[in-house]
Image: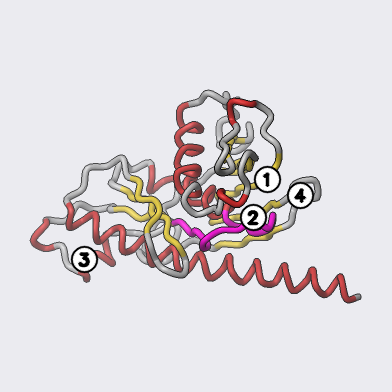
Amino acid sequence: LRIDGRRATEIRRISCKPSVLSQADGSAYIEQGNTKCLAAVYGPREPRQKSAILHNRANISVGVSFAPFATSERKKWGKSDKRLLEIASFVKQTFEPVIQTSSFPRSQIDIFLQILQFDGGTVQICINATTMALVDAGIPMNDYVCACTAGVIQQVPILAYDDKLMSQDNPVDLNLIEESSNSPEVTVAILAESGKVTLLQSESRLSLKKLQAVAQLAKAGCREICDVMDKALRKNVKDLFGKMEA
């Protein structure tokens, strides 16, 4: 068992709720373990700056912030913080080919993400929260996007690296302590229906065989997470129709 009691292939407890902010066009709140994220989407709307206007499609703007109380040490995160800019870039890269931006030329879609509590898996929770907020905003997408992180906790010789070892030594959905162990990790985002990978991000050096194995674990985690998100979104729509009929 891992440090938080989970099996190697077990994702953290996840709960999510769309439509949590009345002033946003779309919003969502997600908890994955002890990591908590709030997402808000505004638009499509007129760009605030003319330089952001794209004549054939909508421009996507992503902003990421950490609440001062998100980590054990209270810290004020600046907008130019390298880590925040990296996360925003990953989210933008993931959704640009998925959102049907050509339907909204000369407009802008603003995505704001705030980490309220941090315990690992920042990129994955930001992507998952963005998916739910975009769906809540009614912005057309080609498919749901779901993300998960997997890694290697114990180094295993390449020749002994088989499926049995993979399940023991490559945990899925890493928490903060596991991420801080300097072990290799891979974040994968997939399209729920087709399974196509839209993001594969790793700052670690892995052999191709290990990378493929860890990515497969992450993809399996993505599918589990997507099932939870889909149920929450469908329940929200059902509740909205119930209120309209009442």
214 in magenta? no
Query: Label 4 is placed on what type of residue?
Result: Leu
Give the foreground label among 4 and 1: 1
Q: Which of marks 1 and 3 is nearer the N terminus?
A: 1
Q: Give the range drawn in magenta.
A: 131-147
Q: Report whether residue 98 is seen.
A: yes
Q: Name the residue under label 1.
A: 44
Task: Look at the numbered disc 4 and give the secondary structure of its residue.
Answer: loop
- Please tell me how crowded label 1 is: few (under 14), some (14-19), or many (20+) other residues with Cα within 10 Å: many
Q: Earlier in the sequence, mark 2 or mark 1?
A: 1
- Residue drawn at the location 56% of the way across and 31% of the way down: 73
Question: Residue 176's image quarter?
Answer: top left
Q: Report whether residue 112 is seen.
A: no
Q: Name the residue under label 4.
A: 21
Q: How far apart are marks 2 and 1 (CA)?
A: 8 Å
Query: Label 3 is placed on what type of residue?
Result: Leu
Q: Earlier in the sequence, mark 4 or mark 1?
A: 4
Q: In this view, does 51 lie above or below 245?
A: above
Q: Residue 173 carries which label?
A: none
Q: Earlier in the sequence, mark 3 or mark 4?
A: 4
Q: Which residue lies furthest to the left in this view?
A: 159
Q: Distance between the residues labelled 2 and 4?
A: 16 Å
- Could you say which is closer to the camera, residue 14 or residue 148? 148
- Residue drawn at the location 37% of the way across and 66% of the way down: 9
Question: Residue 31's image quarter?
Answer: bottom right
Q: Mark 2 points at which residue?
A: 139
